[in-house]
Amino acid sequence: MDDHLSTAPPVASTTYPVNLTINGQPRQFEVEAWVTLLDLLRERAGLAGTKKGCDHGQCGACTVLVGGKRINACLTLAVMQNGKDITTVEGLADGAQLHPLQQAFIAHDAFQCGYCTPGQLCSAVGLINEGQAGTAAEVRELMSGNLCRCGAYPGIVAAVTEVMGLAEHQDNPDRPYLPGTVPA
Ligand code: FES
Ligand code: FES
């Protein structure tokens, strides 16, 4: 082995300060530029409720809310979210009082293994905030970026439409249809 390589001091990685408000709590981190928001949440903030499925924007398991808007946390770097307000599944309940969507997911059996559920819940909160879904079909379309390998879709749609006050199987033909996908 080349001597100068074996004795070279390790190169320290450069880190950057990232200040976030996570579930209402101010948090400070020092992270390398390549750390995703998902890895920051799971590995540095101790919030493992947000799940890593594909790690490249295909499954929606990592969906969180940034400023009330849903995003895939695996597709954004933590440094890009400096100063932002993040809500994860751990922040949805109000103390011991579950969020209405959490209650509805239980009532409608909207999960089996539960791996996709944190992302489904955060995506549904974002969907409601967006205000673009007015029918069950639009709920399905606008949550199509959140995959469920257990196939709990009927329960998920039933839970979300119930919280939104929509009839699960009744679509309004007069309402303009706005196709789209879950934002990255
Ligand atoms: S982990 Fe699959 S979209 Fe992020
Ligand atoms: S409940 Fe198992 S992946 Fe959705």
Image (cartoon, helix red, strand yellow):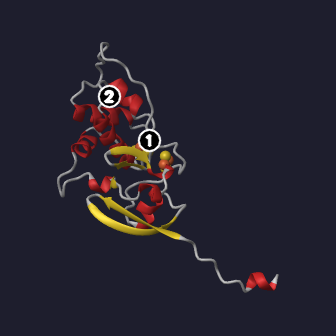
Whether residue 157 is visible here, answered yes or no, is: yes
Q: Is residue 49 above or below residue 160?
A: below
Residue corresponding to mark 2: 133
Task: Answer above or below: position of 15 versus 90.
Answer: below
Residue ranking furthest to the top: 174
The quadrant where ligand 2 appears is top left
Secondary structure of the residue carrying numbered label 2: loop
Of all residues, the one furthest to the right in this rendering is 1
Looking at the rendered image, the disc whose residue lies closer to the viewer, 1 or 2, is 2
Query: Mark number for residue 10?
Result: none
Report the residue at 39% width, 60% height from top.
Answer: 48
Beta carbon at label 1 within 8 Å of ligand 2: yes
Give the side of residue 109 with respect to residue 80, left or right. left
Residue of label 1: 150
| Image coords of residue 82 (percent x, y) | 40, 59
Q: Is 152 on the left-hand or right-hand side of 57?
A: left
Q: Residue at x 37, y 20 (%)?
A: 177
